[in-house]
Amino acid sequence: MMPRLKTGLRWIGIGLLAAFSFLEAGAQAPLVALGASAPGVTQAMRDVKLSVTVAGRIESLQVSEGSRVREGQLLLHLDRTLEELEVQRRRLLLQDRARIDELRQKEKVLQQQINSLLPLLVTGGVARKQFEDEEIALGSVVAERRALEAAKEREQVELQLAQEAYERRHLRSPIAGVITKLAARQGESIGPSEPVITVVDTSRVRFIAAVSAAAGQRLRPGLSVRIDLGSELRLSPRQAQLVFVSPVTDPSSGLVEVIAEFDNLDGQVRPGITGRLLF
């Protein structure tokens, strides 16, 4: 009897410890399963911290906390004068095709001369050296034209590199959502990969909880479950779908993590609130 009593007390202690951990952490899913339900916490499906890949000074900040943004919308840009001038210089170099056009015209004239000399060469009306000189001149013109055209291809790549360097001084939103945090202001300097803006999309929410190993055996992705959220907030229950049931059991608690998702197009559910998963 004593070993069974000790084991029972051990599992009671684990359950109480997990419950207290939930109350303290708030943002973490609790690891307690109570029969056909389990407490948990909501999270936004997409919560991204944005940064630029180069260092610089914020020249223009076009959003503030609470701003709604579209996917691809410009949020800020760094000082970009040098990069803009470099793009213009590369574009002008690429557009300058005067020498190539001149060589094409010269090539056309030389080809016509060679074609007119060819019958005379057969009849002896023109010296072979004169004919060969014309061919050599044509070959030189063709070689120069081809070299310039290859240079234009390199200039096209260099223009694209300059445009990429220019674009890297801009920060655009990868998702549609709401700005929840600005870590820097206009005029401030920021470093590469330094989180500057946080964008959250709350149109779809996931609920993270944990159930007992026995309950985890009965759950499968795709099952429909009910989520009761924040009773003090008087939110209506949400129908959700299980999208993940962990294939492993947490060795310290003997519990299995599960994740359910539901739509939140009305925006009534603020990610971060707690609730209970019913299954």
Image (cartoon, rainbow, N blue to C red):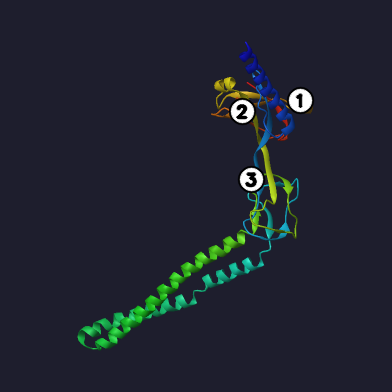
Q: Secondary structure at mark 3?
A: loop
Residue 119 horizontal side relative to residue 155, left or right: left
The residue pinned by badge 2 equals 252
Which residue is located at x 49 percent, y 74 percent? 97
Q: Which mark is residue 133?
A: none
Residue 6: where, in percent of width, then height?
A: 64, 17
The residue pinned by badge 1 equals 231
Residue 36: where, in percent of width, then height?
A: 64, 18
Which is closer to the viewer, label 3 or label 1?
Answer: 1
Return the disc, 1 or 2, that comes first in the chain's sequence: 1
**CA gap, disc 3 and disc 1:** 31 Å
Q: Secondary structure at mark 2?
A: loop
Which residue is located at x 35 percent, y 82 percent? 137
Residue 96: where, in percent of width, then height?
A: 52, 74
Residue 27: where, in percent of width, then height?
A: 70, 35
Q: Secondary structure at mark 1?
A: helix
Which is closer to the viewer, label 2 or label 3?
Answer: 2
Query: Mark 1–mark 2 contact, CB under 8 Å?
Result: no
Where 164 sits versus 129, above or below?
above
The C terminus, quarter of image: top right
Where 276 sits versus 119, above or below?
above
Where 30 sits versus 107, above or below?
above
Which is nearer the eye, 69 or 98? 69
Can see residue 228? Answer: no
Look at label 2 and name its amino acid.
Ser
Return the disc, 2 or 3, that comes first in the chain's sequence: 3
Circle 2 crowding by C-alpha within 10 Å: few under 14, some 14–19, many from 20: few
**CA gap, disc 1 and disc 2:** 30 Å
**CA gap, disc 2 and disc 3:** 37 Å
Which is closer to the viewer, label 1 or label 2?
Answer: 2
